[in-house]
Amino acid sequence: QFVRVPYDIERAVQLAVEAKMPDCERYELEIRTAIVHK
């Protein structure tokens, strides 16, 4: 069973940038497109 839940993508990206997450650009691309880029 799949359940759709609200998810604030903009906030997730903002938090990743603020935390200086490694590979942040890649994470942003993946979270916005829902495609894992290797």
Image: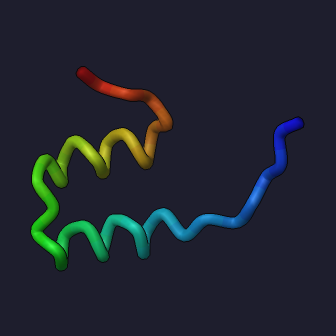
Q: Is residue 11 above or below residue 21?
A: below
**Colour scheme:** rainbow
The quarter holding residue 1 reads: top right
Q: Is residue 15 left or right of residue 17?
A: right
Q: Residue furthest front?
A: 1
* Quarter of the rendering occupied by the C terminus: top left
**How many numbered callouts?**
0
Residue for point 83% across, 39% down:
2
Residue in view at x 10 percent, y 68 percent: 20
What percent of the width, then of the height, locates residue 9? 48, 63
In this view of the protein, which residue sits in the foreground, 14 or 21? 21
6 vs 28: above or below: below
Closer to us: 22 or 10: 22
Q: Residue furthest right?
A: 1
Residue 18's place in the image compared with 7, above or below, is below
Location of residue 15 (image quadrant): bottom left
Q: Position of residue 10 (x, y in %)?
A: 43, 69
Position of residue 17 measured from the top left corner of the image (x, y, whole percent): 19, 70
At 43% across and 47% down in the image, what residue appears? Answer: 32
**Residue at (31% x, 42% y) in the render:** 29
Percent across and percent down for residue 33 are 45, 38
Judge left or right: residue 2 versus residue 15.
right
